[in-house]
Each structure stands twice: as C-alpha cells, then as structure tokens.
Amino acid sequence: MASCVQDVKRRGLLRLWVVVIVGVIVLASGFVILSIHNGKSFFEDINRFEPSYEPGRVVDHRDVALIEEYLRHNPEVVQAIAESNWFFAHASLGGNMLDGMMLLHKENPQLYPLVVQKVGSSGNLPGQASPGTIYAANRRDSDQGTKRELFTSYMEKGWGRQVTAVMNKLSYTDRENIDAKLEWDENIQKTQLLAEYYRYTMAIAQEANPDLKVVSITMPLTTNELSANFMRYAFNQELRRICQDKEMLLFDIADVESHFPDGTVSGDVHKPSGIWSEQLVALYTTDGGHMNNDGKRRLAKAWYAMAVTVTIEN
C-alpha cells in the first residue's frame, strides 16, 4: 500500500516537473521572439511581405501592417518618394503625425526618406520647394470654415504648383462635430454637408492644379463614448462615400486609429441612435485623442502608403 502511495507521489512530481520544464521552454521562446523583435514596441504591427500588395487610392489600417516590407522590396518606389514633396495643413494631431514621420526617418532614413520643414501658420512659400520634404503649416484649431479658407489661401500662395501632394487635416475637436444640442437627424445632415464642403475645397485645389495630388483625410477620433464620436463617424462615412464616387485619394485616419494591430476594430453603439460607430484604440493615445509613439508610428506608416500611391500615379 505504501509502495502504491509513493508511486502516485512520484508520478505527481513527474507531471509537475514536466509542467515546469514546458513553462520554462515557452518563456525562453517568448524571450527569443522579443529579442528578435529588436526591442520594438509590443503594439507595433507585424509586417509581412505579400507580393500582391500595393497601396490603393484609399489608405487604411491594412496598409499599416504591410507598408514596411513593401518598401523594403521596392527600393525604386522609396527613391520616388524621396523625390516627392508635400504641403500639410494641420493642428495638434497633425503634429503627432509629423512626429511619427520624424521617428521613422530617424530610425531608418534609407527606408523612410521624408523630412519635415515647418512653415508657420501663415504658410508662406520658402522659395523653391525641396524634394523629400513635408512643408507643415500649423494653422491651429478653429472652426472648419476657417480651416477651409486658410487651405484655399495656402493654395493661392502657390503651394499647389510647388509640391507633389497636399493634405488638409481636420481635428477631432472641431466644434461643428461636437455639438449635440440639435436633433440627431438634423445634426447628421449638417455633418454630411460639412463633408461636402470639405470635398469641395479639395476639389478646387485639384482643378487649379491638374498635376497636383490632392489627398482628403477622414476626421480623427477619440476614445470617448460620447455623441461627438458618432458625429465624426457620420462625417467620415459621408467623406468615404464621396471619395469613392469621385475616385479621390483618401487617407483614412479614422480607420487606422480604430483598429488594433491584429486588425480587430474598436467601436461602440451610439445609444440615442442605435448606430455603431468607430472609436480610437486606447493603446495609441496619451489623453484619449492625441497619439503616443505607437499611434504616431501607425499614422506615419499609413502616410507612407499614401506616398506610394501618390508617386506611382505620377
């Protein structure tokens, strides 16, 4: 009887040691994998090469995971990007995007060749625009009408004739899209009209400069579960529809912000309307709206995917 008890104990101890050894192997494997990852953030996308991949006229979260390896396998495209230049009208989140562009450039200038030059809120031309440069005009936050007027004035100063591509980014703080006092139907109609106004401003720049690449941008999101995020979603859905109908270039910031690295989407139901809408993934933000380094890199990689489309179409 005692012998049987000892045998049971031995088998129990043996199983315990097997569990411990397997656990050590798994931990060691994880350490090796993290070491191979060269210390990159846990939330960095896993880049994988797909020979059939090529950025399209709409850039979203799918491009973030694929663009780095695409650039590695297409040095001639990287060279074309290095010869392009950009004008970018923005505010604080745009500053986050520029930070991301500078982070990528610092880490690997051969793969990410674009540099940033600030031109101030006046957006005055610095003379002849240089290749490989993003000219950034921080026009601060204001109402959308003022932002459209400023962008038009920048184009009139000659930017549309000086650069390869232009972008005019709106903000998640735009007052028109955080006003929840109206009836929802009226509010949605107002938001859809704002998307059309935005599209019209970009179309004017395109008509005045036929060779210019004019890139529209969806409105950024927040982590809030408030009505404001729903109105941003309504704006973005209308802009997506317009860009598809008009075959316009679209940098879908909201889509990039609302997807986890594994491709799953963050969102919630807007209770007054019962409609699901996107939300900013909390992993990417410092305050519920602005980007941490992971968020900055994601938006910068998406920018490079749009740069590929812009240069290929030239």
Image: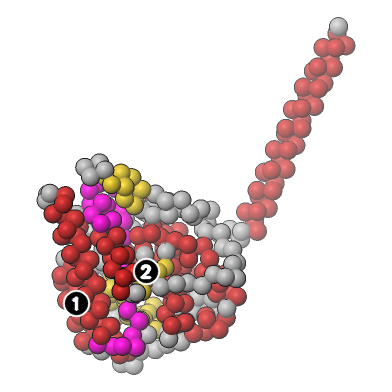
Residue type at the position of mark 1: Leu
Front residue of 115/46: it is 46
Queried whether the magenta region covers residue 293, the answer comes back as no
Q: How is the image coloured?
A: secondary structure
Please identify the quarter of the rendering in which residue 140 is found: bottom left
Residue 270: horizontal and vertical position, in percent?
27, 45
Residue 227: horizontal and vertical position, in percent?
22, 48
Residue lying at 23% horizontally and 59% vertically, measured from the top left = 173
Q: Residue furthest left?
A: 182
Please identify the quarter of the rendering in which residue 7 is found: top right
Local crowd size for mark 1, using a 10 Å CA cut-off: few (<14), some (14–19), many (≥20):
some
Task: Residue under label 1, please give it.
Answer: 150
Q: Residue furthest right?
A: 3
Residue 2: horizontal and vertical position, in percent?
85, 8
Q: Quadrant of the C terminus?
A: bottom left
Q: Is residue 159 in view?
A: no
Residue lying at 29% horizontally and 60% vertically, measured from the top left = 237
Please identify the quarter of the rendering in which residue 238 is found: bottom left
Whichever of callouts 1 and 2 sits on the residue coming sooner in the sequence is: 1
Q: Residue furthest front?
A: 245
The answer for how far apart the CA atoms under marks 1 and 2 are is 20 Å
Task: Residue under label 2, please give it.
Answer: 251
Magenta part of the protein: which range? Answer: 208-234
Residue type at the position of mark 2: Phe
Q: Is residue 198 left or right of residue 41?
A: left
